[in-house]
Image (cartoon, grey):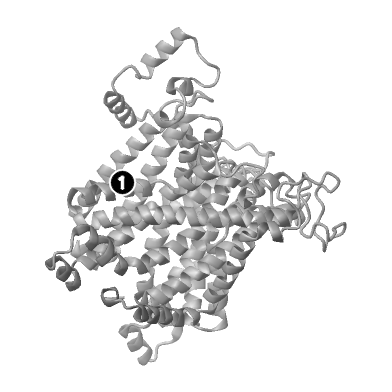
Amino acid sequence: MLRLILRKLGLLIPTFIGVTLTSFFFIRLLPGDPILLLAGERGVSPERYQELMVQFGYDQPIWQQYLTYLGNIFQGDLGTSIVTKQPVLTEFMALFPATIELSVCAIIFAAVVGLPAGILAAVRRGKTLDHTVMTTALVGYSMPIFWWGLLLIILFSGILQWTPVSGRISLMYWIEPVTGFMLIDTLLSDQDGAFWSAVNHLILPTIVLGTIPLAVIARQTRSAMLEVLDEDYVRTARAKGLSTYRIVALHALRNALIPVITVIGLQIGVLFAGAILTETIFSWPGIGKWMVDSIFRRDYPVVQGGLLMIAAIIMLVNLLVDLAYGLVNPKIRHTE
Amino acid sequence: MTDTTQNSAPDTRLEVLKGFWRHFKTNRGAVFGLYFFIVLVFIAVFAPLIAPHGATVQYRDALLVPPVWMDGGSWNHILGTDAVGRDLLSRLIYGSRFSLFIGVVVVSVALVVGICLGLVAGTFRGWIDTVIMRIMDIILSFPSLLLALVLVAILGPSLINAMIAIAIVQQPYYVRLTRAAVISEMSREYVMAARVSGVRTLRLMFVTVLPNCMAPLIVQAALSFSTAILDAAALGFLGMGAQPPTPEWGTMLAEAREFILRAPWVVTFPGVAILTTVLAINLIGDGLRDALDPKLKRS
């Protein structure tokens, strides 16, 4: 197992260096003078320009600039926002919990609905239920989620007035961030109704972000189940006279879950792309909206730092999924 | 799909196509998607003849007119008008041109470049393989939409730049598929035979091996056609794709956002257009996969 971890880590190092190179060259590839970009839109005097040139290290050769950049990254220095003057990492850490909260809820929603839907479709293969589930899943998979979010807002916030349009919690409440997760913080704060307000704000974004993973999970579960239901040990279980419920729940599902878990893990990149759109539609104060806003505000150090952090997190999660996969599936562990 | 290309007289090629169509048409959803797509191509090609109004003509006396079946709607604007009085139906009809154009360009670019890189990586292996695949890994470690956004920030927001960005983001899938297929084909006997008989490497790559790697690539092309349309619409929606007043569906949605509660139809129809187009193409893609790739057919 240790060998496997080391091997996978070794594979990640060149990719990580590539990612740092990408974010390093991002600012240098932008049209316009990097110093003026970093200084913001006010413009600078020639003396100040020279100062900034030295301060940002642009007077040094490019490879030295890259090494400095790399060194800064490992000390947790991802640069400073032009707009807020805050360190990028501080901002990232403050906003990240909001994105995690939304993504975790979305994945739970997707799994809770998608797994049973896929299992039912597989068990009732070829029947009306199967067709209905699979058609719905394909519609979900084809959904432009930014439009889906607007539709849900029209229906639930506009016509029915059940849910709020944007934000994480009603403005009536002021919640001191302790963990950064609104659901936990509201419970800790003892304010009446705050928790339900937070839940209410979460519902639509969760559905919107969870839609595509839900469709993927349902499709994947169905095909994994169909494969397993054909296996000899399932036939044996059936011949022994076990009930369909026991066969599906105990024998087949356990083996069908392995590919499904991988798919859930691999959805993280998709989830992040979805978070960009979902957070923009619902004004959800997370990483996705932060990145889009920063691109529009030309706050390039934030874009640069955010890009690096997001890629690093995705690489890390993919590594963990890989390792977890090896853990649950001995076949892989031994062949590697 | 084994050695058919080696002795491909015209009639056997026709046989292959016939066999493919027999498989394909058993999938009713796929056939429906194909018909829908053909109609869409027809609409896109003949847009100026079909559309009742121009795409950017503003009717100042008809702002936010609702669709014909709602109170206050008129047959003059069947799907209503937007905030500056442009006919929605006409804009949607012209918009189909952009979506199909985006799909065709992105898929062609990604396919051609991806096949070349994948062939090189799979044929020569060694350090060049490592370099190409690591670069693809790097592209894949960013969320596709974010990378596209950043690329557009570098290149400047426009439809062309959005298409370039999306093509770059989709590249790795083609490279990986081609490389995997090439590696598995390289160990086959017909490749050995071709080598022994002195076929040059370039001919071996493109003429001998490539045709036998096409099945997964065709399926991927169909699926990434729909992803390209979705991503371009998302970029347009975020203001980083086609710029107003282009009647691109995502851009139309972005312009309509502030009227979401007052005039829901300006938001509804462009989304329906995106959804049905993407759905039709995904149906075709599923059908192609079932017909071309017997290994995946199982269900």
Residue at the top extreme of this rendering: A47
Q: Quadrant of the C terminus of chain A?
A: bottom left
Choose between A68 and A112: the one closer to the eye: A68
- The structure residue drawn at horizontal position 36% and vertical position 52%, both measured from the top left corner, is B113
Q: Nearer the viewer, residue A300 or A328?
A: A300
Of the residues shown, which amino acid type is indicated by label 1? Answer: Ile
Quarter of image, res A330: bottom left
Whether residue A255 can be seen here: yes
Residue B58's spot in the image, x, y percent? 78, 45
Q: Residue furthest left?
A: B196
Viewed as shown, does residue B56 lie left or right of B118? right
Q: How many marks?
A: 1
Which residue is pictured at 65% across the width and 61% down the height?
B46
Q: Position of residue B273 (x, y in %)?
A: 64, 60
Residue A1 appears in the figure: no
- Say which residue label 1 marks: B135
Which of these two is toward me, A121 or A247? A121
Residue B12 sits in which quadrant? bottom left
Q: Is residue B294 above or below residue B89?
A: below
| Callout 1: chain | B
Quadrant of residue B299 in the image? bottom left
The N terminus of chain A: image quadrant? bottom left
